[in-house]
Amino acid sequence: MKKFLMSFVTLLVMSVAAFAQADRIVGTYATVHDGVSSKVKISKVGNAYRAQVIWVDNLKKEDGSIRTDEKNPDAAKRSTPANKIVLVEKVTYNEKKNQWDNGKIYEPTSGKTWTVTISFKDEKTLKVRGSFGPIGKSVYWTKLD
């Protein structure tokens, strides 16, 4: 019984540590993509994580109207304001690889969706890599909180 209890406690502690590592991604990040500064908030949704734009430097066009997700292939999403676009959806933590994967990243400047992997480059910098097979592009997000 004592061995069982010790095994159970060890497993419980390891599970809690894995969840804490997975949730490390949650927070607000600053990034620059195609010359435009923005802030992105990563939050946990169920057992996965999503990233949504919460601020963009050039939200208004010259005529004063709000920039929208006009290149989105889903016509229903084209009226989404630029500061509310969901960039990453359904990434999950891969403990073996110490990264978040199995999700998609949307690139509003092109309207394309890619496979995504996310990992910490250092304590405050996320490497966000969108790819289609061997072709890909990495961007870096700096954690603000």
Image (cartoon, helix red, strand yellow):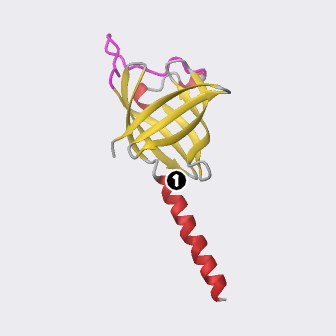
Q: Which residue corresponds to the image point at 57% horizontal and 65% vertical from the top-left?
A: 15
Name the image quarter holding the N terminus. Answer: bottom right
* Left or right side of 1 for 107: left
Residue 51 place in picture, x, y as percent: 48, 38
* Left or right side of 14 for 63: left
**Front-most of 72 and 119?**
119
43 relative to 5, above or below: above
Badge 1 crowding class, 10 Å Cα cut-off, few under 14, some 14 to 19, many 20 or more, is many
Q: Which residue corresponds to the image point at 57% horizontal and 71% vertical from the top-left?
A: 12
Type of amino acid at the residue the image marks with label 1: Ala
Q: Which residue corresponds to the image point at 40% horizontal and 29% vertical from the top-left?
A: 83
Q: Is residue 68 magenta?
A: yes
Q: Which residue corresponds to the image point at 45% horizontal and 52% vertical from the top-left?
A: 24
Q: Quadrant of residue 18?
A: bottom right
What residue is pinned by disc 1? 22
Residue 22 place in picture, x, y as percent: 52, 53
Q: Quadrant of residue 38?
A: top left
